[in-house]
Every structure is written in structure tokens, then in C-alpha cells.
Amino acid sequence: MAPPFREAVGPRFDPALMQRAREKTWAVLHGIRARMRPGISEDEAKIEAAEVFRELGVERLWHPAIIRIGANTVKTYRQRSDPGVRLGENDSYFIDLGLVFDGHEGDVGDTFVVGHAPQRQACAEAARALFGEVAAAWRSRGLSGQALYAFAGERAAAMGWRLNHAIKGHRVGDFPHSIHKGGDLGELEASPSSGLWILEIQIAHPTEPFGAFHEDLLST
């Protein structure tokens, strides 16, 4: 069981509202996906994202929207994108959103492919599959956060991809979760509770400059 301070929540916290925030954040992500097109830049995509936020009633952002295109898909959250990158005819991109609905935080991410790019498509599908395997291991075996990421690294290598070990998941909750100092999932020495932790998976091709990202709430 995780230490209480790692999973502390505020007086307004409601597990049902956490799930609702998750569902609404996924809806926003797919609204942005519908606006992505060859030729668009990351900055232009963020302008489109802001319009979707207004249309779908986003209360606020708890982290800036991240949209990575092409070679920038190998970069981590804190790394700056290389400028001037535009979505190609046969290319991939990912969207990473941290939104607030009803005072609760949604945090989701996924990777998509345009045109015909079989290796990139395989990478996107592998990120989703790896997320599913790791989440299933948490549900069935009660693994700690540290063990989950060790397992993720082993499975990514077996699948032929390179896991980005700098991406280790994190806490969410009623906004702002940061006051509770939950820390990274990958540093958690206990099994995470349902509905409080984001599992992040970022992988890359072992030699080519592209990767994929998938994240969602760990929930039973």
C-alpha cells in the first residue's frame, strides 16, 4: 500500500468525477485528432487544440497541451521540439493533454498515423499494447510502480522497441494534485491505488527517429 501522503486528496475529491474528467479529456483529444492534417505544424495544431478546448468546455489546463510531430515524437515532456517540423503525408504524431473538468484532472495521450507509414503505425500500436500489458500486470499482480516500469522496459525490449525510461508516470487528482507531492509512479515502492495514477508509456524505434506515446489513468 502506498504511503498516505503519496495518495492524499483534497476534500472535493470524487472518484466518479475523476472518471468523468478522464472520459471528457479523451473526447477532447479525439476532437484535436480530427483537425490534424498533413502540412500542419505543432504551433498550428495547438491553435486548433485551443478551439477544441473552448468548444468542449474545458475548465482549465493543468499542464500545457503537447503535440509532437515526426522526429519530435522521441522527445520527452521537458524537451523542446525541434522547430519547423510539419506533419508529412506519411507520418505520425502524438497528443498529450492535461485538462480539468469539474475540479478534477484528466491526463491522456495517444499516437496517430496519417497516410501509409507501416513502421510508425506498428510503433503506435506497440505503445498501446505495452500500456495494456503493464496495466494488466498491475491489476492481476499488484506490482509496485517501480516494478511496473521494470516490467515495461523488459516487455518493450522483447517487442523490439526502446522504452524511454525518463517517462515514469505521475499522480493526478482533484486540482491541483501537485500540492499533495505524489511524485512519479516509477519511483513508487508500493502498488498504486486505482484512479489516482497516470501510467505513461513512451517508446521509440531502436534506430529510426520516431516514437510513440500512450498514457491513461490506472483504474480497475
Image: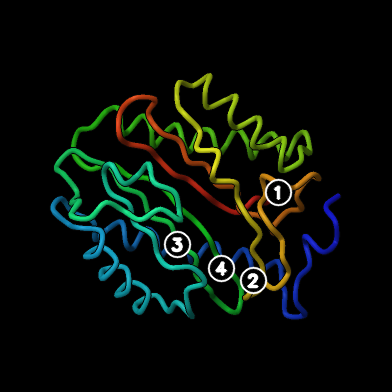
Secondary structure beneath dot 1 equals: loop
Does dot 3 land on a helix, a strand or a loop?
strand
Q: Residue at x 23, y 32 (%)?
A: 117
Mark positioned earlier in the residue sequence (1 or 3) = 3
**Residue highlighted by disc 3:** 97
Q: CA distance from mark 3 to mark 4?
A: 12 Å
Residue 141 image position (x, y, % from top left)? 77, 33
Give the spatial CA distance, label 1 vs label 4: 16 Å
Residue 89: image quadrant is top left
Query: x and y percent of residue 5 in the render?
Result: 82, 64
Looking at the rendered image, the disc whose residue lies closer to the viewer, 1 or 3, is: 3
Cα separation between marks 2 and 4: 6 Å
Q: Is residue 31 above or below residue 91?
A: below
Which residue carries the number 1 mark? 220
Residue 21 badge? 4
Q: Amino acid at mark 2?
A: Leu
Q: Secondary structure at mark 2?
A: helix
**Mark 3 crowdedness (10 Å alpha carbons): few <14, some 14-19, many ≥20:** many
Q: Amino acid at mark 1?
A: Thr
- Left-right relation of 39 to 96: left
Q: Which label sits in the foreground, 3 or 4?
A: 3
The answer to the question of whether label 2 and label 4 lie on touching residues, with beta carbons closer than 8 A, is yes
Name the N-terminal-most of marks 2 and 1.
Answer: 2
CB within 8 Å, label 3 to label 4: no
Q: What mark, if any, has residue 65 been given in the picture? A: none
- Tell me the amino acid under the disc marked 4: Ala
Tell me which corner region of the image, top left, top right, bottom left or bottom right, holds residue 142: top right
Q: What colouring style does the render use? A: rainbow
Q: Where is mark 2, residue-wise?
A: 17
Q: Secondary structure at mark 4?
A: helix
Residue type beneath disc 3: Leu
Q: CA distance from mark 2 to mark 3?
A: 17 Å
